[in-house]
Image: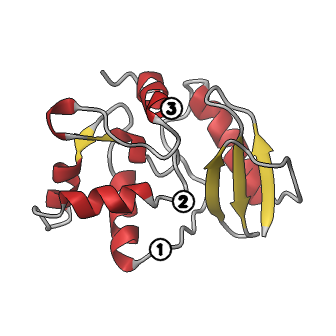
């Protein structure tokens, strides 16, 4: 397992991964660096471009660990276009489970690769900002970077 801490406008981010894929992003950065790998360097570059307003989609290979349902939710999140916010109910409906908004919210909260798997683009009914692992201020900042109102 490899680890690299990068600085960002939302604070330090600890990137973790294997030689093949990014497996996690943690807010706060933790206790510094570690051994890096090319995939982490790619993730760091892409995040820097994202925060600079240059990048709208990520290409770094991902390998999030979770249940089959969580992985389906996270894949659905990756299909939400940059600059767009949708409700938990909308994501549930797209998965063919219209009554599963709460389950989608729970899967969102377990997202191991925030920012790149854009769980910040999911909001509550009526446009309300609710819950975010890094804190609502980070969710607001990410939506602002993308021009979401």
Query: What separation in Å lies between label 2 and label 3 (alpha carbons)?
Result: 16 Å
From this view, report whether residue 137 is shown above or below residue 103: above
Q: Quadrant of residue 123?
A: top left
| Disc 2 to disc 1: CB gap under 8 Å | yes
The residue tagged 3 is 138
> Which of pointers 2 and 1 lies earlier in the amino acid sequence?
1
Residue nearest the viewer, comparing 147 with 57: 147
Whole-percent x and y of residue 64? 54, 67
How many discs mark residues in the rendered view? Answer: 3
- Asked whether the beta carbons under mark 1 and mark 3 sit within 8 Å of each other, the answer is no
Residue shown at 60%/62% (left/top)? 61
Q: Residues within 10 Å of mark 1 (few under 14, many from 20)?
A: some
Helix, strand, or loop for circle 2?
loop
| Mark carried by residue 66 | 1
Give the left or right position of residue 17, taking residue 136 as reference. right
- Give whichever of discs 1 and 3 has the lower sequence position: 1
The image quadrant where one finds the C terminus is top left
Instruction: Please name whichever residue, 78 or 88, is drawn nearer the observer in this view of the structure.
Output: 88
Question: Which residue is at the far left?
Answer: 98
Q: Position of residue 37 (x, y in %)?
A: 82, 60
Residue 97 appears left or right of 130: left
Is 79 placed above or below 2 here? above
- Residue 96: percent from left, percent from top: 14, 67
Position of residue 45 in the picture relative to residue 62 (left or right): right
At x 55%, y 24%, the residue is 53
Dot 2 or dot 3, earlier in sequence: 2
Checking the image for residue 112, the label placed there is: 2
């Amino acid at each position: 397992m490899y680890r690299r801490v990068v600085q960002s406008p939302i604070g330090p981010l600890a990137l973790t991964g294997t030689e093949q894929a990014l497996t996690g992003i943690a807010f706060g950065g933790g206790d510094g660096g570690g051994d890096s790998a090319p995939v982490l360097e790619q993730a760091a570059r892409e995040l820097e471009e994202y925060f600079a307003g240059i990048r709208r989609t990520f290409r770094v290979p991902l390998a999030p660990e979770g249940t089959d349902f969580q992985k389906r939710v996270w894949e659905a999140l990756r299909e939400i276009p940059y600059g767009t916010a949708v409700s938990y109910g909308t994501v549930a409906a797209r998965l063919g489970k219209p009554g599963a908004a709460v389950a989608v919210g729970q899967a969102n909260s377990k997202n191991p690769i925030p920012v790149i798997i854009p769980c910040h683009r999911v909001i509550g009914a009526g446009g309300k900002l609710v819950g975010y692992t890094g804190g609502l201020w980070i969710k607001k900042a990410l939506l602002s970077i993308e021009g979401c109102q």
